Amino acid sequence: MLQSALFLLLVTATASAQAAGADGMTPANLLTGAAFALLATLLFAALLYGLERVWRRVSERLGHDTTAEDDVHSLGSFALRFAGHLAGLVRWGLWLALIYAWVVFVLECFPFSRPLGEQLGGLVLSTLTRIAQGAVNALPDIITLVVILFLTRAVVDVLGQVFDSVQSGKLQLPFLHRETTGATRRIITILIWGLGIAFAYPYIPGSNSEAFKGLSVLFGIVISLGSTGVMTQMMSGLVVVYSRALRKGDFVAVNDVEGMVVEVGTLATKLINMRNEEITIPNGVLISSPIHNYSKLSSSQGSLLSTKVTIGYDTPWRQVHAMLIAAARSTEGLRQEPAPVVYQRALSDFYVEYEVFAHINEPLHRIRILSLLHANIQDQFNEHGVQIMSPHFFDQPAEAVVVPKAKWFAAPADKPDQA
């Protein structure tokens, strides 16, 4: 197609030169045209040389600034690289503009090629005129578009200040909790920007063209087909947030995962377990599983930690209680208030099952604190000569396995008058 257009232009130029007659083909006119063409060529070469020098200095400057960045992945580094690509596009655009101008001027210097040069120059002039006229006609729509987007941004900023006040506790609204402020803010921001874009869409230049409409339909189909799973996770995330089942800083257990919540995101929730591993749980999995929140009701008392021991019936239960509480009180990391407590969980066939409960401030150190508690329990039982065992009888003992009343308050248990 380009070759056909050039051929038609050459035919037109030849016909115009023949119509002008041979008067313009004098040696004086040809020499004058050659002189002007030579001057234009020299000027063209000088401009290209200057353009290349400027481009070399700009590229060296941008390259130096990019390597001088402390973090190559920082926003400033990306901005400099973008500026470098933009400068490269401007350079090639100036190259093409200078070449085109030089070709048009040289063609107009000679009588036999002047019609072709005039047609090429007129083509550029008509194109620029059409572009300028389109920009002038679109100016009212562009102003309306800017006003709509400015008002939308203003509304979002005002509501953002309200949400910041609620999240910081300076403002209390009956329908908005501090835990759900972040999610509510994101939802309302998306809705407001969606309405703003919907109102601004008709004023976008070219929005009524068939190409623009087809592209919009294509994007709509792609988003509809690819966002099913994403929307499921997003809706699950909203359920997690608005049910207030957990929040950042809570120690929770989900299925076989125990850890502290470090992020409640739109698509997934992240935990850090006691091995200092980050575990990501999709919100769809989270809402379909039981969530054990050890911090929700603990308030200022901390999270609960417990462990079990099974002791024979021949050991006084008061002594076992006292030894377990003493072991808990001597364990570093367990709180003294509220005081540790012991419960008898079961009276089995061969032994009694005891469980001691205590509060901890740092759930992530649960394994270390539990290990210290186990060590202190062993020390307490060894110190008082009590075996930690779960006896099973294969034959009935000769004597009844009971605790004499004189040993009911064996050390370290306290008698009622000493309590």
Image: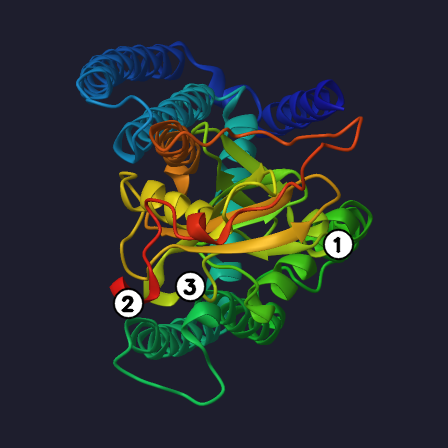
Q: Nearer the viewer, residue 294 or 66?
A: 294
Residue type for callout 1: Ser
Q: Label 2: which residue?
A: 417
Mark 3 neighbour class, 10 Å CA radius: few under 14, some 14 to 19, many 20 or more: few
Screen quadrant of the N terminus: top right
Residue type for callout 3: Ser
For the question of whether residue 129 can be seen, the reply is no
Q: Label 1: which residue?
A: 288
Residue type for callout 2: Asp
Q: Residue at x 65, y 65 (%)?
A: 239
Label located before the other in sequence (2 or 3)? 3
Q: Nearer the viewer, residue 227 or 3?
A: 227
Q: Residue at x 48, y 35 (%)?
A: 273
Evaluate if marks 2 and 3 touch, with contact meaning CB atoms under 8 Å apart.
no
Disc 1, SS: loop
Q: Residue at x 36, y 57 (%)?
A: 302
State the image coordinates of residue 378 (x, y, percent, origin top left).
41, 29
Q: Label 3: which residue?
A: 298
How far apart are the alpha carbons under marks 2 and 3? 33 Å
Q: Nearer the viewer, residue 138 or 222?
A: 222
Q: On the rendered structure, is 338 left or right of 60?
A: right
Name the front one of labels 1 and 3: 3
Mark 1 neighbour class, 10 Å CA radius: few under 14, some 14 to 19, many 20 or more: few
Compared to residue 213, the image places residue 326 above or below, namely above
